Amino acid sequence: MRISLNWLKDYINLTTEPETLAGILTGCGLEVESLNQYCSVKGGLDGVVIGEVKTCIPHPNSDHLSITTVDISRSEPLHIVCGASNVMAGQKVAVATIGTTLYFKDQEIKLQKTKIRGEVSEGMICAEDELGLGTSHEGIMVLDPFAIPGTLAKEYFDVYEDVILEIGLTPNRSDAASHIGVARDLVAVCGINQAIATRMDNIRLMIPDVGNLKTDNNKRRIDVVIEDTTGCPRYTGLTMIGIKVADSPKWLRDRLNAIGLRPINNIVDITNYILYETGQPLHAFDADKIRGEKVIIKKLRGGTKFTTLDEVERELTDNDLMICNAEEPMVIAGVFGGLESGVTENTRNIFLESACFDPRTIRLTSKYHGLQTDASFRFERGSDIDITVYAIKRAALMIREMAGGEISSEIVDVYPHPFIRKTVNLSYDHLDRLIGKKIERDTVKKILISLGFEVLGDDQKGLDLRVPAFKTDVTREADIIEEVLRIYGYNNVEIPASIHSSVSYAKNPDPEKIQNLISDYLVANGFYEIINNSLTRSAYYEGNTDFREQNSVRILNPLSRDLAVLRQTLLYNGFETIVYNQNRKIQDIKLFEFGTIYSKVDPEKDDHSGNSSGPLLKYQEEKHLALYLSGRAIAENWNSAGRKVDFYDLKGYINNVLVKANIDLSKLKTETLTGNIIKEGMVVLLDGKILVNFGELSRLLLNKHDIRQEIFYADFFWDNLLSSLDTKGIKFRELPKFPEVRRDIAMLVDNSVTFAQIEKLAYETEKRVLKKVGLFDVYEGEKIEHGKKSYAVSFILLDEQKTLTDNEIEKVMQKLVRMFEEKLNAHLR
């Protein structure tokens, strides 16, 4: 938010330097992000003065140049070569002296003493476009004959200069979204700071008086009806007739330009001025376009078409609050005006609106339609319900002064349910404890009174306070303490000399350490971590049979349609990242993401007592880890064939992740997985809990998301994995003293038999010396009978107490073969 220093001085007597002022504001919670010098003319016409052309003769070496002498009230006139056809003696002109920088046609030109065709030129007689005062380049500017030579051009042309403070306003500080709001904080800070107070006189908030507003007649009254009192708790209106729409006076245009607002006309400019002065948005209607002489505030049926001021036809929702006349809508309340109801150069009669709207209603409408305006910015943060009448009076006085006309009705103030200001008790003990310092009680009271709080009671224990209506964020004692602290100054609270400590408790195993361990492993193996927004598109779940739309957790006030629900899976966010990389020709992708997914669980229909349990919704959050693999397994180089990643690359990473997490792979159970998401893959379980789903994603799903390449995907159920960890941690053993032995067998099995079954059966059969089972060949072909396949399996045997003998090894292998034949119908080849 931009704040003008000159404008600020209307409300508080400021004499401090801008840099000091920026420090004061930042210290009280209004962070000044930048200080910028503003000038209505670029460069401020520095070095440009008013001169009088004394002589003008043709240049001897040119047929279009003139040699002039110009008096700028110095000891000697300047000799200037001029190319303008309209220059002549006796004229008063604007002269840029040597060293002046001119900003012309997006260029910076610094004038130097030079010779033009053999004649010395000590400056430049300027046209209006060369000074930034207009666009004409037909000749030099010829000024008023009474202009005084030597006068600075910035004074003659009344160049406006200002300092603009860019304030990073936090969402809770709607009370400071105006010049008066910022001035109020400055008054509070300066009032308790003696170092500042000694440099400033009469420290008080000076708010313009509107007490002299009087109604001229009652020739034109427009009635107001509020049908939706929740969406619009207060609506104030006033009619004026006989006004003249024209350009605003220079001072008003300068102030609006300085804060980045484009002046439009005197009526619209005044409403914008009041907005930035008080924080109260106003709207001016062409009264002759209000049919039925009635303004109605209501919500229309969803799907109603409405054309806004930007000439875009929009479809309204059931939530959109509208300002209507007796026949049709005119304005989206608190957000944007309609095409037909605004003020134009032909407007003669106006109806002024000053209202208070429900923040939630305005926020939903603003986000849904993608309309971010100065009015919606303030209304959706909470506006001051008590300021509507003051703001409309202030606007009416300014309009009567600048546009003429008559106030043709009494103020219509529809206020069905008057706002009851909050009362809060402040305990001095709580104040001292939370701040960490005892602040003088008189200082506390002075701060609160200067911020607009009303003291209802005062004793040794604390204060009873009534909160001003513009402090919409102050609802409890802690908020009052925050107000006191930010004005008193965080830097004024000394760091205590004592040290306090507490005993920390960490879970075993520590989830954060485990996550970091896995992240380090993945990064070391070429993966990039991605972090996506938990908010995602509702369109992902529409008609989705894997993640049902009714299970989505919807946001009540979504930032946009693309951020309307909480994600039910990490998959679709990952797709967005993959598409982003794919569109930039990055095909080799190794990504991982830790994130939380959210879903809505169907409510229980029975509370086990025979009665309906009611519509109690349950929500669940689960943490997951997603892996994405695509492209080449090894980066392209001269000695590599550039093999593409496959299912087994992904499976290897998954096994290593499980080992890193201290999961015993021999205890895992695997099942095949096929579906709409994973075309072909596996489910890994431990004690009946799913640890990870993984496999190749279906082409139909990838095509739907415009992904051209194959993607291998793993989805770890992180909470299940953590709950399955061995709490005793990783155990270390010394290297075996005795040699291990390897034996291989080849067997014929049915096509339905998997290696996982063989591995499981082997470990169940021999638990003492069998250490590892491996598959090193699979064969299906002409020499194998139909429905069969050949597995070549290796077995690693080791006795940690002695060296195995041939006889012991043979007994183990015979036992294994016998079990394979009995349980799996296997036959040795």
Image: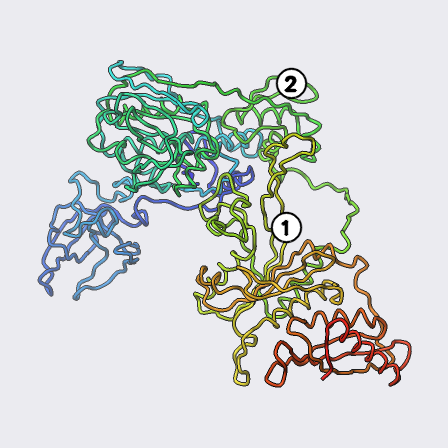
Residue in front for this viewpoint, 302 or 451? 302
Residue 339 picture quarter:
top left
Q: Residues within 10 Å of mark 1 (few under 14, many from 20)?
A: some
Query: Whole-percent x and y of residue 133?
Result: 24, 46
As drawn, is 33 to the left or to the right of 433? left
Q: Residue furthest right?
A: 801
Quadrant where the C terminus lies?
A: bottom right
Q: Which residue is mark 2?
A: 458
Question: Contact, CB < 8 Å: mark 1 with mark 2?
Answer: no
Seen in the picture, residue 488 relative to 445 is either above or below; the reply is: below
Residue 323 location, x and y as percent?
Answer: 35, 28
Residue 330: image quadrant is: top left
Of marks 1 and 2, which one's residue comes earlier in the chain? Answer: 2
**Mark 2: secondary structure:** strand
**Residue assigned mark 1:** 622
Q: Look at 21% across and 47% down and name the residue there.
A: 51
Amino acid at the residue labelled 2: Asp
Mark 1: amino acid: Glu
Residue at the image position 63 percent from the left and 28 percent from the top = 477
